[in-house]
Amino acid sequence: MGPLHGFRVIEMAGIGPCPMAGMMLADMGAEVIRVERGTRLSPDQLNDVSFRGKKSIALDLKKPGGVDALLRLVDEADVLLEGYRPGVAERLGIGPEACRARNPKLVYGRMTGWGQEGPMAQASGHDINYIALAGALYAMGRRGERPIPPLNVVGDMGGGGMLLAMGVIAALLEAQRSGQGQVVDAAMVDGTAQLMWMFHGLQAGGFWNAEKRGVNVTDGGAPFYDVYETADGQYVAVGAIEPQFYGELVRLSGANAGTMAAQYDERRWPEMREELERVFKTRTRAEWCSSLEGSDACFAPVLSLLEAPGHPHNQERGTYIEVDGIVQPAPAPRFSRTASEVRHGARPAGADGEALLSAAGFTPTEIESLRRDGVLLKC
């Protein structure tokens, strides 16, 4: 059983970071109940990895009885997660005040892009907008070129879902001592700003040029921290920042030692890059793996999503698993005593509705009434 076994989480249906937080809590053993709202239920959700390990109930919260049914589930919950625009939960009657009036120990986790207040709070947005406002997007891209969107992993997932999960767990720990829950306001702008902590320090110390991209050590500016094409059109990544690791890269790759001297002389970076480009194109990716993988040259092949699960390192560690025919990342981090696990794959929308309501004290007659009135739904 995972470290969160015994905790109950209500997750209001949404996309992206909030479901990711719920997935992490479910992997760690919490009972996570995903609440689908409305009547547009789709069987396509069975392919959504973030639904794994969760139970599902579908309630029409705009009909009489829908909000009451949800609040009765909240009575016995430890956490509620929602990713609505600010004010939506309050208008539905399921905001923090309404929920915590019934359950003072409840941790109410809120996931937004801009935060619960501020001039942008009510504006629409996506990952690219949040990381732009936090200064992260500006820093990503080649020298003299426009910024490059880094998938939606920085704002949505790292600065969003993981931030929410961490905040909720911290609030749960505090609630065990105080007996009181609280609201966790997790915003992707805030989370992205947290992820940029190192670069603020480097800029202050004169080790980072925040006005330009592609000219710094870890943004592709340095030739020893970049991606190179191989003879077969594949790519490898090197990150030999420290002098001793850089020395190994030069030695094991066979690059010209004279050209590669003076690692941190930025004036020589263009010719050093040309030398590494030349060298790496002399062998295939597999051949470079044979020479450099596992060494102190800070080397790795650039693998696709399809290739990564088959790499020997990932296979030995069990970094990926297969659930219901879908290859996906295994739970992380790992615990020595209370191991996380994926208990099952995605459940059809509303599949657990009757059982969940029955466990919450609803009578068969009440459940049938909710079904008949279109409040309790099933895909």
Image: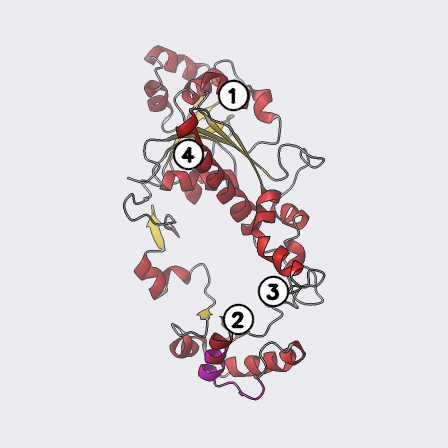
Residue 163 is at least partly visible in this image = yes
Q: Which residue is mark 1?
A: 61
Of 293 and 62, which appears nearest the observer? 293
> Tags 1 and 4 in contact by the CB under 8 Å rule?
no
> For the residues marked 3 and 1, what is the alpha-carbon distance in whole angstroms?
47 Å
Q: Indicate which label's residue lies in the foreground, 3 or 4.
A: 4
Of 73 and 211, which appears nearest the observer? 211
Q: Which residue is mark 4?
A: 173
Q: Is residue 270 left or right of residue 93?
A: right
Q: Which residue is mark 3?
A: 219
x, y percentage for residue 325?
A: 34, 49
Q: Which residue is mark 2?
A: 241
Amino acid under disc 3: Asp
Sooner in the amino-acid sequence: mark 1 or mark 4: 1
x, y percentage for residue 205?
A: 64, 61
Q: Which residues are magenta?
A: 248-259
Instruction: Determine the residue positioned at 33% across, 43% down.
Output: 342
Q: How many marks?
A: 4
x, y percentage for residue 118?
A: 69, 34
Asked whether residue 196 is drawn in magenta, I would say no
> For the residues marked 2 and 1, what is the alpha-carbon distance in whole angstroms?
54 Å
Instruction: Determine the residue positioned at 34% across, 12% down.
Output: 363
> For the residues marked 1 and 4, what is the alpha-carbon distance in whole angstroms?
31 Å
Sooner in the amino-acid sequence: mark 2 or mark 4: 4
